[in-house]
Image (cartoon, helix red, strand yellow):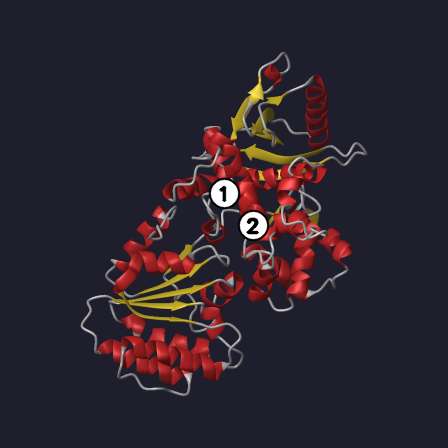
Amino acid sequence: MEEILVGRDAETRLMEKYIASQRSEFIAVYGRRRVGKTFFVRKVLGKRICFAVSGVANLGIKEQLTNFYLSMKQYFPNAEYKKSWLEIFDELRQQLEKLNSKTKILFIDEMPWLDTARSGFISALEHFWNSWASVQSNIKLIVCGSATSWMINNLINNRGGLHNRVTHQICIEPFTIGQCNEYFKAYKFAYSIRELADCYMVFGGVPYYLSLMDKDLSVAQNIDRLFFANNAELRNEADNLFRSLFLHSNDYVNIVSSLGKKMKGLTRAQILEDTKLQNNARFTTILKELEQCGFIRSYIPFDGAKRSLMYQLVDSFVNFTIHFASHNNYHDEEYWTHSLNSGKYNAWSGFAFEILCLNHTNQIKKALSIAGMQSNVCSWLSKADSGAQIDLLIDRADQTINLCELKYYRTEYEFTKADETNINNKIQQFISQTHTKKSVRLTMITSFGIKPNKYSGYIQNSLTLSDLII
């Protein structure tokens, strides 16, 4: 079956708009590994590409130059081998000038791998763009890379010759749960809403991981097959993911593992205490790169100062790996299926559902009819000994706060007297300690809604998984 481009309508419209412009364009396409950047570019542009090359991991300058030359030979049989990046980009210029194409689309994939140490790649690219390509009207240079921090630091925020030269950016993000649903429908999967949520909470909406699933198996069976069976395809994926993106990746893994212990996140000082890493510039860089790559986010808690900045794990796949995929001590090939009714599963699913909701705040706001309203999404932790905390607050510009309680449950959630007492206590502590004058609305976000009873009237807003699949 031919592969279908799903869930990228907005990105496709942008790409076509940029390609149709009356000037040369330098377009940076970036996003995490396995998210489908290359597939997107090739599916949208196809045979319109007049030259394409992809960097190769762990090769030196000589091998990368050879790789570039061999790619040129596929498109330009008369191309000559050159011994430096300056020369090979000049050779590319000469070959492009011979083409009669109205629009000349170039695609350089996995660009960070081409930029080996002291190779002069970036300087040569700068010269190619600034001295020739940018002054044409028909060159469309598309560059792509999984090392998001490299793409941002070396291209988008470049302080040298490429400063402000990138004309457009397209960030390819993991699918939302709604786009996962669209993907499965396109490929004739028949998954329930509950299975769809489990799938998102494990795979995080990363298209490559979804592509490995077998539609003849349930989500649970697929998870066992991909993570826990002998020779499972994704058994070592998390390690490979970090090693492919970061040098000395163990420190990055230690930080996300630390953040995986607390849904609300940790301060810089708390991460340092837990990981025993050095408090220095490199630690700052690691946090920045993890955030640029979408593994974590930083935010200021409600009523907090800038110095109370929190870091929070927001990558579902990494969270699953921390809590499940790395703990199959007995090598059980059906470890996931055997864990579905366990306390470990319940603890993980609560955390994972909170990450799901956090990654769908736009959908939550739309369901609450506040999509266009300025708001801050944060959490709150009581300073008193009670330990009360609120994992998701939507602090709105209209003097209203949605206090969100998140419950991942197999059926309708039955709101009890204990729930009412507990949440009322949270709200009172929140108002008392923050001195907020805003209206506080209790918003329940559950799998399948709230079972009506004498306590459910306490809830002002109730959203379900169906409200997020939009």
Give the Cα distance between marks 2 and 1.
10 Å
Label 2 with label 1: CB-CB less than 8 Å: yes
Give the x, y percent position of residue 189.
42, 40
Element carrying mark 1: loop
Horizontal placement of 411 versus 160: left or right? right
Inspect the image, locate mark 1, and give the three-letter code of the amino acid beneath it. Leu
Tell me where residue 109 appears, x and y as whole percent: 41, 67
Q: Is residue 263 visible?
A: yes
Q: Is residue 263 above or below residue 327?
A: above
* 311 lies left or right of 62: right
Sequence order check, earlier mark of 2 and 1: 1
SS class of the residue under badge 2? helix
Give the labeled residue for mark 1.
217
Q: Which residue is mark 2?
A: 225
Q: Residues within 10 Å of mark 1 (few under 14, many from 20)?
A: some
Residue most toward the right?
385
Give coordinates of residue 149: x percent, y percent. 53, 62
